[in-house]
Amino acid sequence: MSIVRSIVYVLYIISIFALPSCSKEDSLEEMERIKIIGDKNPIKALAMLDSLKIGIRKENNYVKNKYDLLQIRLNDKADNIPNSDIMIKHLIGYFEDKGSMLEKQEVTYYAGSVYRDLRDTPRALGYFLKSTEYAKNGNNCDSIMLRNAYSNLNDLYYKVQNYNDAAKMAQEELKIAQQTRTNTITPYLHLGTAYIALNKTKEACDAFDGAFEVITHSGDISKHQSDLLYLLCDYSVLMQHSKAKKCFSLIKYTPLNEFSDFPCMAFAKYYELCNKTDSVIFYCKLLLDKGTDIYNMYDASKLLYQIYSDRGDINNVSSTN
């Protein structure tokens, strides 16, 4: 009988030591499943992650930090703006010290995202750049995250008017999109916009032509209405009349049915190209009446000022100031 009790006792001790290990693996596997779901449905994934919160408290530091990093990732995908950088600071310290190259790529990428949302551009740039370095130096990088890092760098450099580096980042973004056979339309648009800022008209047109070709060969134009609106505006700015006209013919959306700031500006720019001044005035005024985006409203005011000045309409010139 004592032998049986001894065996039971040994099995009990083994089970005690085995449980944390199984629990750890189960938690990591579940978080990986939630991570995949979060790529398409971050709101659902956040709810699933929250259900693990109590159990995670019993896990070791590695699992807890993986949980916190996944939480930041899902909030970023759900467009939830962080309140502070406290959590990401801790995660940077942990994973840069103890993480794999892939984890270092991820934590610095999301550090860039947090500081981008907190409007700390220098830190955002620094961490996105560091993320690309980890990706290039590792044997197993996340290609989509690398592409997205270059996309963010393009946007940040553009906003601080560093158009040369903005173009370089867009080129890298496009290269990876082509290699991974993912969306190349956005990188082409980023590249073209940077070239416009650099006054490189031919290069800008080539980039926009690349985007237009992908759209027209996609088999479903309806999915690319917002991209066509950007192309409409860009081709109009570049005075590419025939290309702008082709874009316009494919656009089914109209701000008259469902108002949005940028489409109004795109239509105004197109009608300016077509010398239809009354239509330009209509869409600019609509944007100023209903708009919320300060940059588009500024462009609309500038366009109206130019029109009224050319007409010698002093009263309306004063009203646009």
Image (spheres, grey):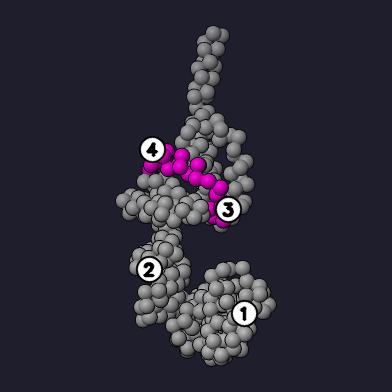
Q: CA distance from mark 4 to mark 3?
A: 28 Å
Type of the residue with mark 4: Lys
Q: Which mark is residue 98?
A: 4
Mark with earlier residue (1, 3): 3
Task: Identify the disc placed on residue 319.
Answer: 1
- On the question of residue 151 being in view, the answer is no
SS class of the residue under badge 2? helix
Residue 311 can be seen, yes or no? yes
Mark nearest the camera among 1 and 3 is: 1
> Real-space Cα distance between discs 1 and 3?
38 Å
The nearer-to-camera label among 1 and 2 is 1
Find the distance from the CA under tag 3 to the CA under tag 2: 28 Å
Q: Is residue 249 magenta?
A: no
Disc 3, SS? loop
| Residue 38: % across, % down | 55, 52
Label 4, residues with CA under 10 Å away: few <14, some 14-19, many ≥20 = few
Q: Which residues are magenta?
A: 74-100
Residue for badge 2: 163
Main secondary structure found in the magenta portion = helix
Residue shown at 55%/35% (left/top)?
Answer: 56
Q: Single out the mark in the foreground, 4 or 1.
A: 1
**Distance between the Cα atoms at labels 4 and 2?**
36 Å
Three-letter amino acid code at disc 1?
Ser
**Is residue 76 in the magenta section?**
yes
